[in-house]
Amino acid sequence: MSLPVRPGMTVPLPGPLHSHREKLAELADLGYTDIWSAESDGADGFTPLALAAAWEPRLRLGTAIIPAYTRSPACFAQCVASLADAAPGRFAIGIGSSSNVIVEKWNGVPFEQPYKKVRDVVRFLREALTGEKVSGSFDTFQVSGFRLGVRPEQTPPILVAALREGMLRLAGREGDGAIINWLGPDDVPQVTKVVRDAAGGEEKEIVARIFCCPSENADVVRASAKFAIAAYMNVPVYASFQQWLGRGPALQGMWDAWQAGDRKAALAAIPDEVVDQLVVHGSPAKCRATIQRYFDNGVTTSSLAILPLDPELKHWDAVRSLAPNAG
């Protein structure tokens, strides 16, 4: 049986968290089924979802993603169990390695053995969420005698944020699905095949964060998007991902200029076609058609991330124009 198509939105939404109740209700009214939080330098990944758990029961809640490094194992399990207890049957925990910038430079945690760290956290959570006592040595940490005091009525699915083949296979083999990021609709089959093969053909959820700017001011959108692309694609894990997808030749000029310290030349070296592949832009109708291509190619759940690339575009107008009920 095919998994349901789940159109989702990235949170938090603009404005203070306490102001989001009516906005979350409107998301559900517009046909969005999911909200997915992230954790980098803004709100933590759980608080926006905890508010939504209480305010809007129509929405499924997910994290895309919580870094595996920035919470100790027991604390991580408590956070997951608490939110699963607050929203039984409608919470999914997404875990990833994050990046050396967030983990090491911002949080002071060595960014070591990312594959093993994510795998170990997934395995630990599987054990801890049963409510049984966990004692054992994982490759990247040890736990002795921990038992969750909160046992959710329904165990949440565990999704793995994955870029290249190792993490994608982990997502298929030990996770309930994969969370993917910074790729175009035509890249999706390459990614989903690895997950499906690792799962032995079993269908797994594929959550895609899709960067969108429904504006026809293409020159402004592309110029602004190149700043975001340069910021991400010079992080080693994202650079390697784009090389694996086949964009190495198209991005090599940008990488060379960046390494030479010439940021202006690096931005200029990013081809427009790369922007068009990685950022959904154009008229709302064109954007909705492009988003549909992600689903057609194997994505099961979207997490639209509205990028403020056109200063004339208002965030909530973009949310409404891309909604499942629009058009």
Image (cartoon, rainbow, N blue to C red):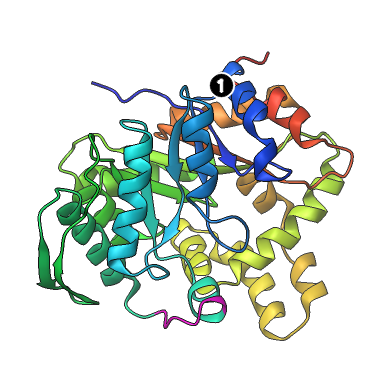
For label 1, the crowd category at 10 Å Cα-Cα, with few meaning under 14, some 14 to 19 and many 20 or more, is some
| Quadrant of the frame with the N terminus | top left
Residue range of the region highlighted in magenta in the rendering: 106-111
Residue at (53, 58) in percent of width and height: 39
Label 1: which secondary element: helix
| Quadrant of the frame with the C terminus | top right
Q: What type of secondary structure mainly makes up the magenta span?
A: loop
Side (left or right) of 302 relative to 326: left
Residue ID for mark 1: 28
Q: What residue type is labelled 1?
A: Ala
Side (left or right) of 65 relative to 55: left
Residue 261 x %, y %:
74, 85
**Could you tell me if residue 159 is visible in this image?**
no
**Could you tell me if residue 141 is visible in this image?**
yes
Q: Is residue 255 above or below residue 260?
A: above
Residue at (29, 49) in percent of width and height: 194
Residue at (28, 51) in percent of width and height: 171
